[in-house]
Image (cartoon, rainbow, N blue to C red):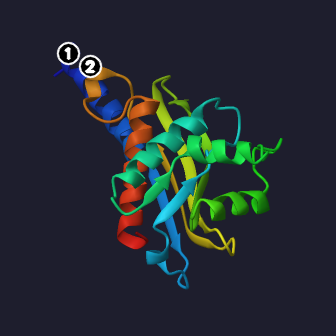
Amino acid sequence: MPVPRRSRLQVALLGLALALSCLSCASGMRVYVNPDADLAFYKKIAVLPFTDVGSQGMAGARVTRAFVTEMIMTDHFQVVEPEEFVGALHRMGVFQGQDGFYDPEKVKNAATEMGVTGILRGAVTEFQMGRSEGGVEYPVIAFDAELVDVNSGNVVWRSSISKHGKSRMPVFGGGSRSLGQLTQQACAELVGELRRKAI
């Protein structure tokens, strides 16, 4: 008995939905905590804007803002936000190098003057719309973040996450379909893991 045309379409769509659902679940997260670090010591932290590793434009700024928001929501830190900290660096004559980084010693001096014990920094390695073999677009993000002790330069904790969102096709229901949504979700998940292990 032949399968009705409508049923064949539903089966095909279901198969595609199942395939794409794997993308929505495709993520990796890693967190390292320095066993010698006194985590309670890092109450006031300064944030350097996350760097863009590649040509993602404003990806660093967008991920930085979302990540800092999640950090503030933990109610654990007094955060010197990127604009304020970079402004302080500029007033001291410290500017970003061609490699996207600031002179570590000068950053340390600025942080010490502000009473900061830890510096949060990170890098965005992927921030784009991916495309499946069937031509369906979905958001992709990957970044890392770490907290560094101001005095020693030692890593207090280091974390990374890579995550794929869902297709933009409305038939598949919920999930993160835009880079903005996926960024917020990835930052919330990573900070949630940090809360369990390092905060």
- Decide if residue 22 is in sight here: yes
- Residue 166's place in the image compared with 8, above or below, is below
The residue pinned by badge 1 equals: 6
The residue pinned by badge 2 equals: 9
Give me the C-alpha separation between circle 2 and circle 1.
Answer: 5 Å
Number of residues whose C-alpha sits closer than 10 Å to that of mark 1, classed few (under 14), some (14–19) or many (20 or more): few
Q: Residue sitting at 75 percent across and 44 percent down?
A: 100
Rendered location of residue 41, percent (x, y): 48, 76
Residue nearer the viewer, 91 or 64: 91
Residue nearer the viewer, 172 or 14: 172
Decide: marks 2, 1 in contact (CB < 8 A)? Answer: yes
Quadrant assignment for the C terminus: bottom left
Quadrant assignment for the N terminus: top left
Q: Residue sitting at 47 percent across and 59 percent down?
A: 29
Secondary structure under tag 2 reads helix
Indicate the quadrant where residue 121 lies.
Answer: bottom right
Residue 121 left/right relative to 171? right
Return the residue found at the far bottom: 36
- Residue 96's place in the image compared with 134, above or below, is below
Rendered location of residue 77, percent (x, y): 42, 61
- Residue 198's place in the image compared with 179, above or below, is below
- What residue type is disc 2 on? Leu
